[in-house]
Image: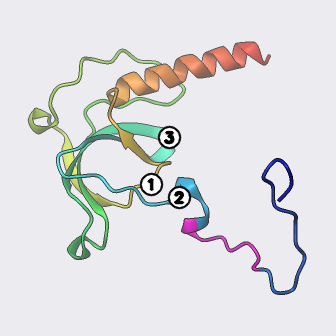
Amino acid sequence: PDNRGRMPISNDAGSKGFEPTCSNHIYLTPCFYEAKARLIVAEAHNRWVDAEVLESPCESTGWRHRLLISYSQQADSDDLIAMSPQTPLAGQEESTKELMQLNCMNSGCAWLSAGNYEEEVHKMKVFLRARHS
C-alpha cells in the first residue's frame, strides 16, 4: 500500500476479477428487519408506500419478508399532493400482504411516512432542477 492506504493495481493472471454478485454491491445486500418494524418500501414507478413487517425472512417464506403494505396514500413521484397524517397500519384499509426481498435500495426504516418522504424528495428535485438549470 502507498502512504494513503491504497493498494497497487495488479494485473496478475492469478488475481480474481470482478464478479457481479449481490455481495459485491452494498446497495443490493439483503436487509433483515424484525417483525412489527415500520418501513417505507419502493413499489413500481418509484412510488413509496408504508409497510409493516409481519414475518421476518425464514425458510418457509423463501427468505423473504412478509409485509402488510398500505396503498391508501398514492402519489406520483413528480406530482406533489396533500398527504393526511399517517394512521396506524393495523386500522388502515386497502392493505395487502406481500412477500418481498428487501435491500437498501427498495426499503428503509419509517422515520417519515411514505407521503412525507415523497414530499421531501419532491422538494429536493425542485431545488436541484432550479440549481442546475
Badge 3 marks a residue whose secondary structure is helix
Magenta span: 16-23
Q: Which of marks 2 and 1 is nearer the N terminus?
A: 2
Q: Distance between the residues labelled 2 and 1?
A: 6 Å
How many neighbours does mark 2 have within 10 angstroms: few (below 14), some (14-19), or many (20 or more)?
A: some
In the rendered image, which residue does mark 2 sit on?
A: 28
* Image quadrant occupied by the C terminus: top right
Q: Name the residue under label 3.
A: 46
Instruction: Name the kind of residue labelled 1 in the image.
Output: Asn
Labels in figure, total: 3
Using the numbered discs, state the Cα–Cα distance from disc 2 to disc 3 in whole angstroms: 17 Å
Residue situated furthest right in the rendering: 11
Query: Mark 3 against mark 1, which lies toward the viewer?
Result: 1
| C-beta proximity under 8 Å, tags 2 and 1 | yes
Query: Relative to 119, does residue 93 appear above or below in the rendering?
Result: below
Taking depth in this image into account, of 132 and 44 the one nearest to the observer is: 132
